[in-house]
Amino acid sequence: MHALTGDAHAAGEGGWWSNLIGEGKAIDTNKYFVICSNILGGCKGSTGPSSINPKTGKPYGIDFPIITIGDIVNAQRNLIDHLGIDKLLAVVGGSMGGMQVLQWMVAYPKRIRSAIPIATTMKHTPQQIAFNEVGRQAIMADPDWHSGNYYDKGIPAKGLAIARMIGHITYMSDVSMAEKFGRKFRSDRAPFKFGADFEVEGYLHNRGDNFVRRFDANSYLYITKAIDYFNILNGHSLGDIFRGLRAKVLVLAFKSDWLYPTYQSQEIVKACKLSGVDASYCEVNSTYGHDAFLLEIEQESHLISNFLRSVTTGNGNKGA
Amino acid sequence: MHALTGDAHAAGEGGWWSNLIGEGKAIDTNKYFVICSNILGGCKGSTGPSSINPKTGKPYGIDFPIITIGDIVNAQRNLIDHLGIDKLLAVVGGSMGGMQVLQWMVAYPKRIRSAIPIATTMKHTPQQIAFNEVGRQAIMADPDWHSGNYYDKGIPAKGLAIARMIGHITYMSDVSMAEKFGRKFRSDRAPFKFGADFEVEGYLHNRGDNFVRRFDANSYLYITKAIDYFNILNGHSLGDIFRGLRAKVLVLAFKSDWLYPTYQSQEIVKACKLSGVDASYCEVNSTYGHDAFLLEIEQESHLISNFLRSVTTGNGNKGA
């Protein structure tokens, strides 16, 4: 399952997890049949606010209905029903992808043999909500947003770029930024007039500008709201939420990830253990921050391939 | 010395440090003569981009010259020259106020008997620069900014509010936000259309809206740039920068402060120690994050009043 701004293009040239998925890789396409679909509400193939509303013949904009992580996973379940798949060997994903994994564990426990939630959380803290909200405010403050009806006029590029810049700060770590940029000035720095003076500023501008060319601003609004509203506990206790789940679980977290701090992954493990679920936890020593789930390929490969082998050989939970 | 958005109104009704400065308080106005002036580049009494440019009869806007923390401190030195003060008992400040303290220690070591830099740093990391840059981009993306010439037209309120919201996230901590807001919904939440659903969102909107009524957007640009450019080391080594300083130093930091993490204060102490400066360090156990320097009054009072007593009684460095 992909993260906030990901898409179905997980493997192969330019895929967001192409180092992990492929022939002979951790998620080995010689052994496993790999499915990745764009999430509901997205803008890369699945229906979202930029899709045409059949009733009006125009894009939905913010007439698109509210979506939740539950809706996203229901669409995925419809997909495997359509494909005639009764049970998935594993559901795997990082960040918001990890929330979808947790949702599968709770909503369709009998349809999965194993689950790998990575760098994720059972629910957003107010700090996590706050970062998303500032991004949304930046988009909606852009006059080119036009209350979501911008599709025939252009795009709220400045607002969306700012949202992306905020995101990027939270995806990296203090250390990884220091290693990548330090306090280096840009070589093509213009005379002081509030341009990008430091390398880190140029990087953020660049990330922001690239993003607006590939992502829909309304999708950003809907998906971040789905993330903020996500709360897998939803009134259930920690020892109750995964009760009866017979799938084997591997929880991965990264030490320098301050967007989804390791304590949130530890809570998932605790919930599994309290429910008698067969769960392992691994905290990877990385300085990459939240981005580590896309970058710490060697360690992830080792952990995921061994885990999948244990699931397929039944060296573990055989309930499936 | 005040922080980024502070002003000269430090003590008395509504002052930003009124719990710490006053009769019988840690900085006791019965004993000490307290001076706090608005920084150069600000918008609360000192000359800044919103001041009238005598050459044009209009506000400077972004024709205002670049300012540095050095310029800000030079203006303060001019002030004490004007007041006929040869030597200050102490220079004290948190956050950007702490940078001014460090600047005094380096630029005018003979004009101070002691220094208290609080929750600050010798130079911004790329992460710290990045947060400021996103705030600046939000202001400059607002069409009401008009390249800084907005004074006769209104204000870039949306952009400035977003900058402030980003700031507020960094001033609090994960824990303090969880304690203050949790995942509580707003009682007057409107039907879902990307309004503020969670308490934390309403709080940020509110902080943003209040801020634009009291602060000038161009001042925000200039001051954050001064902070980002600040680098007290500037080619000097850690063991060299404070050499010859005979003032006594008290460095304060707060455990949950992730905007100015404690390791940055420890670097200041290390630099002092390597230069043979009489420095003490105290790391206050607080969950308030960076805001702690405005909120942990009891512990700060205790530490600061004892320190000032030791300076005045000569129980410590007598070089002054």
Image (cartoon, coloured by chain):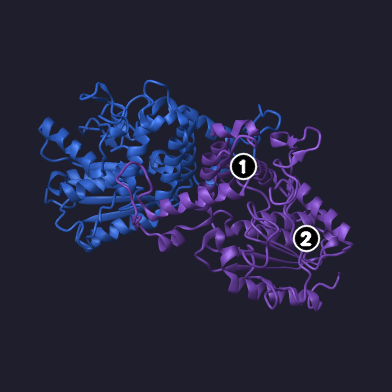
Chain colours: A purple, B blue
Query: Residue type at mark 2?
Result: Ser
The answer to whether residue B125 is visible is no
Q: Is residue A265 above or below residue B103?
A: below
Q: Residues within 10 Å of mark 2 (few under 14, many from 20)?
A: some
- Say which element carries label 1: helix
Q: Residues within 10 Å of mark 1 (few under 14, many from 20)?
A: many
Q: Residue A298: x, y in percent?
A: 59, 74
Displayed quadrant of residue B83: top left
Q: Residue A30: x, y in percent?
A: 75, 77
Q: Which label was assigned to residue A217? A: 1
Going 61% across and 46% down the picture, which residue do you hit?
Answer: A125
Q: Nearer the viewer, residue A251 or A236?
A: A251
**Is label 2 or label 1 in front?**
1
Residue occupied by mark 2 = A275
Q: Residue A309: x, y in percent?
A: 75, 77
Mark 2–mark 1 Cα distance, whole angstroms, equals 40 Å
Q: Quadrant of the N terminus of chain A?
A: bottom right
Counting residues from the start of the chain, the first of labels 2 and 1 encountered is: 1
Going 40% across and 54% down the picture, which residue do you hit?
Answer: B126
